[in-house]
């Protein structure tokens, strides 16, 4: 059973550019969440999608957006990149986000460096 | 507001010994779940163990056990018989019943010495 696949693994972008990260959840999982991990702020929730609808959103500026497709694959986009956006972006999928006892399976992450 | 606190930034343990990683939490929701994840240097978050707020017994998964003390709002992870491959960052996380997100602690870096 394939795990959560994130592409690309590494990315280097220049300030002001935009970037799109991709996440393919475990087959059958309909919920995808995104997290940003930085040394200073730790792991922070970005947003969660379930059946193509955004269910939750974290406290990030509007430059951060996402979407989910009918096959449950998700993309997140960051526009007008800033140096502080350099981070490991983790995607997680879940089969049943409505139950509190369901955690998430995480991908290996995309490490974004903004120069 | 919901919060997870891990007070040990780094810890060392001798191979084959047991180690306890501390985690305290704060929530006003009576229904919640507590998780521990391991993050090796590769970056992937690996699920270790789960404890529900209504579970009567402490969770166990192989060498991992969770010491759940609800009144103290603590959920410490115990790793028995440490192995060199256990060296990694460990994160405690919480999810409330009505929330769709995990709240993470700052993590504890565990180093296992041979």
Image (cartoon, coloured by chain):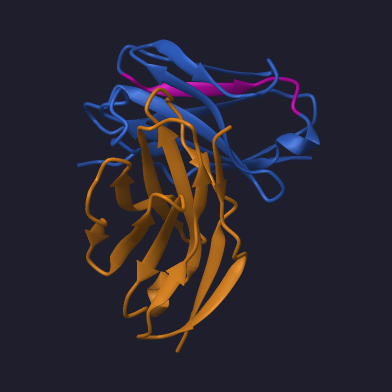
Give the total number of marks visible in the rendering.
Answer: 0
Q: Would you place residue A110 above or below residue B65 in this image?
A: above
| Magenta stretch, residue numbers | A72-81
Which image quadrant is residue A16 in?
A: top right
Q: Position of residue B38 (x, y in %)?
A: 43, 57
Q: Does the magenta stretch include residue A79?
A: yes
Q: Does the magenta stretch include residue A28?
A: no
Q: Residue at x 24, y 60 (%)?
A: B60
Query: Is B107 on the left-hand or right-hand side of B63?
Result: right
Label the orange chain with its letter.
B
Quarter in which the C terminus of chain B is drawn: bottom left
Q: Where is residue B78 in the image (x, y as percent from the top left)?
A: 37, 68
Q: Residue at x 77, y 33 (%)?
A: A14
Query: Is B72 on the left-hand or right-hand side of A105?
Result: right
Q: Position of residue B79 (x, y in %)?
A: 36, 71
Residue farthest toward the bottom in the current orientation of the protein: B114
Which image quadrant is residue B15 in?
A: bottom left
Quarter in which the N terminus of chain B is drawn: top right
Residue nearer the viewer, A106 or A18: A106
Q: Would you place residue A29 above or below residue A42 in this image?
A: above
Q: Tell me the shade of chain A.
A: blue
Q: Residue at x 28, y 34 (%)?
A: A26
């Amino acid at each position: 059973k394939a795990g959560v696949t994130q592409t690309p693994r590494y990315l280097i972008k220049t300030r002001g550019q935009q970037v799109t990260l991709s996440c393919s959840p475990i087959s059958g999982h309909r919920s995808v969440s995104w997290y940003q991990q930085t040394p200073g702020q730790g792991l922070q929730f970005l947003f969660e999608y379930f059946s193509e609808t955004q269910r939750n959103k974290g406290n990030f500026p509007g430059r951060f957006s996402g979407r989910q497709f009918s096959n449950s694959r998700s993309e997140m986009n960051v526009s007008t990149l800033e140096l502080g956006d350099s981070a490991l972006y983790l995607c997680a999928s879940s089969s049943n986000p409505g139950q509190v006892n369901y955690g998430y399976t995480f991908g290996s992450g995309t490490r974004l460096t903004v120069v | 507001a919901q919060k997870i606190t891990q007070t040990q930034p780094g810890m060392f343990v001798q191979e084959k010994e047991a180690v306890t990683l501390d985690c305290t939490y704060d929530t006003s929701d009576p229904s919640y779940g507590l998780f521990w994840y391991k993050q090796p240097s590769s970056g992937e978050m690996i699920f270790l163990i789960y404890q529900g707020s209504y579970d009567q017994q402490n969770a166990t998964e192989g060498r991992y056990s969770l010491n759940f003390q609800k009144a103290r709002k603590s959920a410490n992870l115990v790793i028995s018989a440490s192995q060199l491959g256990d060296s990694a960052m460990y994160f405690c996380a919480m999810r409330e019943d009505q929330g769709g997100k995990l709240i993470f602690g700052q993590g504890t870096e565990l180093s296992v010495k041979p």
